[in-house]
Amino acid sequence: MSHALVDIGEPFRQSKTIPKTKAKSLTREARQLMMTLNALQDLCNQSKLSISISRQLETTLRHSKSPITHILSLGLGSLRVAQGQTRRLKQLTILLAIREQCTRLTGMAVEIYAQDPTFTRTDEIFLASLGISILRTPSSAQLGEAGELISSSTLVYSPFLTIEAYEKLFLHPGRLIPVVFGDDFNALASKWPKHSAERRQVESVMKSGLSKYRRRVISGAGFWLEEDETFPMALYEVVSNRDARVRAKM
């Protein structure tokens, strides 16, 4: 049986990240990051992407057997690196939007955990100011502490994650992640030449891991720009064995 959901009736509008009084305690660099993040939240609220996220999350959570109480962010990257900084802040914007949407839909508190080996101390302090707890891993190809957090109440958020890390996520014996919000593997497979090693890696994950999941495309203009070097995203929800057999016959 799925858990109760609040019918919001329209796309979400996420609130500002933290109160001004708390923002004053941040460093100058962190305050600049916060100002950019707030502007990106406004941009996201006005975009068609927010509508897609809202609808797909609501549909997915209605089918979920357990309420989502934890969001695990993998591969966010350091927010201090200038190259690609806006893209990573946009990734963070979507992460915060997912938390707010899950909270509104279920009426339950949702905790965020983030893990990336490139996080600096400044990154960790900034993320902590947003209510995000930090986990540790020795490399981007290993799950580290994140592997211990995954449960029937976890949503994994992983756009731009390495394929090696995706293998750890999906090909681990006995592990089924309820919801994964990350790269669209159909688009990822077509990125590589047909007989390349990378294409075979992606197809292996799709065949052995994602065959147990239903794919919902996340799309919408008004947020990502060409210079962000973004990539198509999708939401994957695990399906029952019965549903998987029905899909296999279609």
Image (cartoon, rainbow, N blue to C red):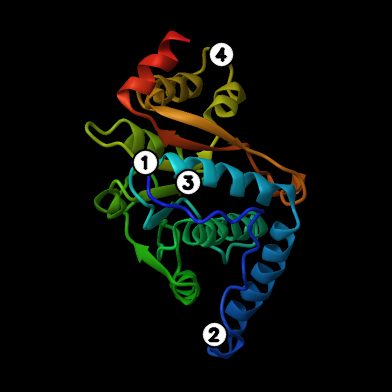
Question: Identity of the amino acid at label 3?
Answer: Ser
Local packing at callout 2 (Cα closer than 10 Å; few below 14, some 14-19, many 20+) is some
Q: Nearer the viewer, mark 4 or mark 1?
A: 1
Identify residue for label 3. Answer: 158
Could you tell me how far apart the alpha carbons at marks 2 and 4 are, in whole angstroms? 49 Å
The tag earlier along the polypeptide, 4 or 3, is: 3
Local packing at callout 1 (Cα closer than 10 Å; few below 14, some 14-19, many 20+) is many
Could you tell me how far apart the alpha carbons at marks 4 and 1 are, in whole angstroms? 30 Å
Give the numbered dot on residue 26: 2
The tag earlier along the polypeptide, 1 or 2, is: 2
Identify residue for label 1. Answer: 178
Could you tell me how far apart the alpha carbons at marks 3 and 1 are, in whole angstroms? 14 Å
Considering depth in this image, is 88 or 215 the residue closer to the camera? 215
Could you tell me how far apart the alpha carbons at marks 4 and 3 are, in whole angstroms? 24 Å
The tag earlier along the polypeptide, 3 or 1, is: 3
Which residue shows up at 40% across the image and 37% down it?
166
Local packing at callout 4 (Cα closer than 10 Å; few below 14, some 14-19, many 20+) is few
Question: SS class of the residue under badge 4?
Answer: loop
Question: Identity of the amino acid at label 1?
Answer: Pro
Q: Nearer the viewer, mark 3 or mark 1?
A: 1
- The quadrant of the image that shows the N terminus is top left
Circles 3 and 2 in contact, beta carbons < 8 Å: no
Q: Nearer the viewer, mark 1 or mark 2?
A: 1
